[in-house]
Image (cartoon, coloured by chain):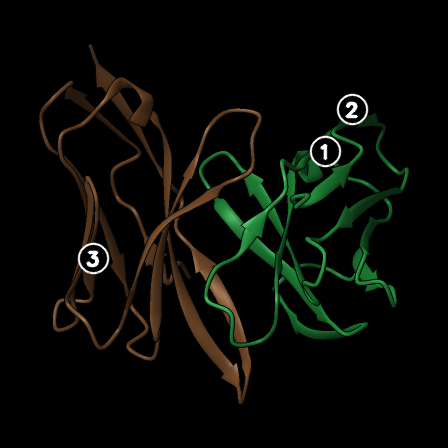
Amino acid sequence: KAGVTQTPRYLIKTRGQQVTLSCSPISGHRSVSWYQQTPGQGLQFLFEYFSETQRNKGNFPGRFSGRQFSNSRSEMNVSTLELGDSALYLCASTYGSGANVLTFGAGSRLTVL
Amino acid sequence: DQQVKQNSPSLSVQEGRISILNCDYTNSMFDYFLWYKKYPAEGPTFLISISSIKDKNEDGRFTVFLNKSAKHLSLHIVPSQPGDSAVYFCAAREVVSSGTYKYIFGTGTRLKVLA
């Protein structure tokens, strides 16, 4: 059974640009969550999607957005990149709303210059 | 405001000894707690969990203790092995609405097991 797949694994952007990250959840999983990991801040919750609907949102500015497709694959977009957006972006999937365990992908490492 | 806190950024333990990782939380409505382990260049992997109605859960070398009155949980690893060297994240599940949850993570503790 394939795990959670995130692409790209590494990318470098410059300030002001925008970026799109992709996440393919485990087959059958309908919930996808996104987290930002930075040194000293741990994993900060960005948003969660379930059946193509955003159910939860963390405390991030509107430059951070996401969506989920009918096949449960999800994308997140960051517009007008800032240096502080440099981080590891992690995607996690679960079967449904009552599931207790998040299964994470390896992450997308974004560097903003 | 950090609802889940891991106050020790790092911990070094000798191989074979016990590792104790601590986590404090502020929200008494958290209903489930989890520990994740993360190696460099990999995503976090689930280690062990505990429901808020329990005070202990054990899985092999790993035991999680929950003290609800103190809003504190700890992960014990006995005996510690060099392969346990990783960053450990504590997480708590918050009920947002009926059937909808949010997971709050701590900042992590880097464990180094010395051979």
Report in which chain the residue with disc 2 lies. A
**Circles 1, 2 touching at the beta carbon (< 8 Å):** yes
Say above or below: A38 vs B96.
Answer: above
Residue found at the very far bottom of the displayed protein: B98
Mark 1: amino acid: Leu
Q: Which residue is mark 1?
A: A83
**Circles 3, 2 touching at the beta carbon (< 8 Å):** no
Report in which chain the residue with disc 3 lies. B
Mark 1, secondary structure of its residue: helix
Q: Measured from the top left, where is residue A113 in percent x and y?
A: 78, 24
State the hue of chain A.
green
Report in which chain the residue with disc 1 lies. A
Label 1 CA crowd tier, 10 Å (few <14, some 14–19, many 20+): few
Mark 3: amino acid: Leu
Mark 2: amino acid: Leu
Label 2 CA crowd tier, 10 Å (few <14, some 14–19, many 20+): some
Label annotation for residue B73? 3
Label annotation for residue A113? 2
Q: Measured from the top left, where is residue A71 in percent x and y?
A: 85, 63
Mark 3, secondary structure of its residue: strand
Residues flagged by tags 1 and 2 on a common chain: yes
* Horizontal side of residue A68 vs A6, given as left or right: right
State the hue of chain B.
brown
Residue found at the very far right of the displayed protein: A17
